[in-house]
Image: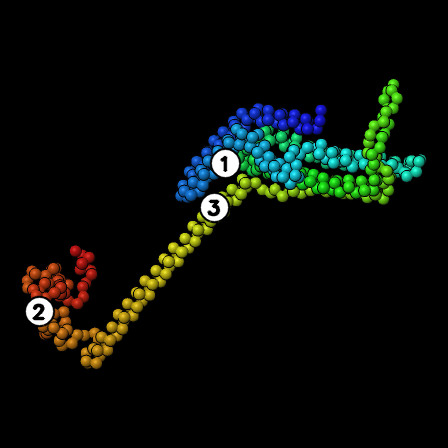
Amino acid sequence: MTPQSIIDAFFNIGELLAGQMQPYAIHLWGLLVLVEIATIAISYMIGDSDNPPAVGWSIVRLLFTAGFGYWWITSSFTLGTTVIGSFDQIGRNLANGPGGLAPSQFFDTAIRIVKILWSAPSSSRLLPSIGLDILEGLLIIAIMIMMGFLGAAAAFSLIATMTIIGPGSIFVSFMPCRFTSSLSENYFIWLVRTGALLLGFYVVLRVIQDLAAKWYASLNGICAPVSTLLPLTSLGAPPSAVPAIACSTPIGVNDLITLFFCMLMMTIVGIGLPWILASMAGNGVHLGLENLASAKYLASGGAKHLSNAITSLSHRISQMTQNSQQQSTLNQRMAAGAAAAATMNSSGASPGSPGPSGPPGSSGGWNGRPAGPPIAPPPNSGSGNGGAALGYYPGRPGAQTRAEAVDITKLQKR
């Protein structure tokens, strides 16, 4: 069994769990859709009946989120692997490798360096250097552990992705309902972050491969490998010579220590870089839609208040214009009255009594009445039996009173 076979086994288990989780997710999705429909209906009856755009937005949001949620639940594993596969394809192009991300690639890089250290002699003399042999052995162990740690981190990311994509689709069922929609947001954020994490491991693998090639060339230049025959012993048989490539010059302590610290630094950066890239994924699409809805509500409310303010201002301006016109008309009438009073004063007549003759074009005094004493009305032709009875005179406009004042007490007695 190899590390790649373990990843394949988790891939198959994740696909199986996605199919088993689908019925539960569909039932939860349907229940929350009904809750959202009831919420829209209650909101309409309570206060949104006079705001049709708000109700329309709620319906559009329900259709979009419910349709998208159902589509994702029924094809969660395929859609999830498609999203992860897009990051995987980008990583392969960056790493210049046809195969996918596998822990064995980190081990292969470490094994190339370990072979050089294993074949390097510990001393140029006949007797080996025990201290140098121990240092080389510790460095070999450290390199294998560090590269194995990087390979295990990459394998963990792959296994977690393939296992959680299917069962995690239950959180997509919370999307249609406005009260539970925030629970579905982290699923898509996690999916994008996992894809970015795998992309980061591809970047680290590309860097490690480039650095390993440089270190391999440097160690080859130091140890000067040559072809030789090494004895190969077997149980119950004499040793036989086997061709091999071995270093002819020992690698110095300074070179070994430098190589150790370079590998340690590369391991630290290789662990931190993918997580930094994954942390760039912020809020999901769902929160963007909620922000768009909030902006829409704020814009509609602001536009409504602005429209009311403009209407009130125009009404106020109209009232001020009418008052100004009425004041202007009153001033004109007052000016005309003052001019008429001035004309009467200049003619010698008192303001409270009419002149000897009526207005121009009339046949006598004021109101078309002939000059001289008042004319008594004919019998039984007045409008009343006494007091201020009215009389009608042919050829003269309007009714004329018999006296200038009316006794109100007489009218009340009637």
Q: What residue type is labelled 2?
A: Ile
Residue 399 drawn above or below residue 287: below
Q: What residue type is labelled 1?
A: Thr
Left or right: where does residue 130 sit relative to residue 377?
Answer: right
Label ID, residue 65 = 1
Question: What residue did someone put label 2 on?
Answer: 375
Front of the two marks 2 and 1: 1
Residue 315 rendering spot, x and y as whole percentages: 36, 57
Mark 1 or 3: the one toward you: 1
Q: In which quarter of the image is the N terminus?
A: top right
Q: Which residue is drawn at 87% across and 24% down?
A: 239
- Which residue is disc 3 drawn over? 297
Q: Earlier in the sequence, mark 1 or mark 3?
A: 1
Q: Which of 362 and 102 is in front in this view?
A: 102
Asked where in the image residue 241 lies, by quadrant, the reply is top right
Please name the amino acid that badge 3 sits on.
Tyr
Outermost residue on the left side: it is 379
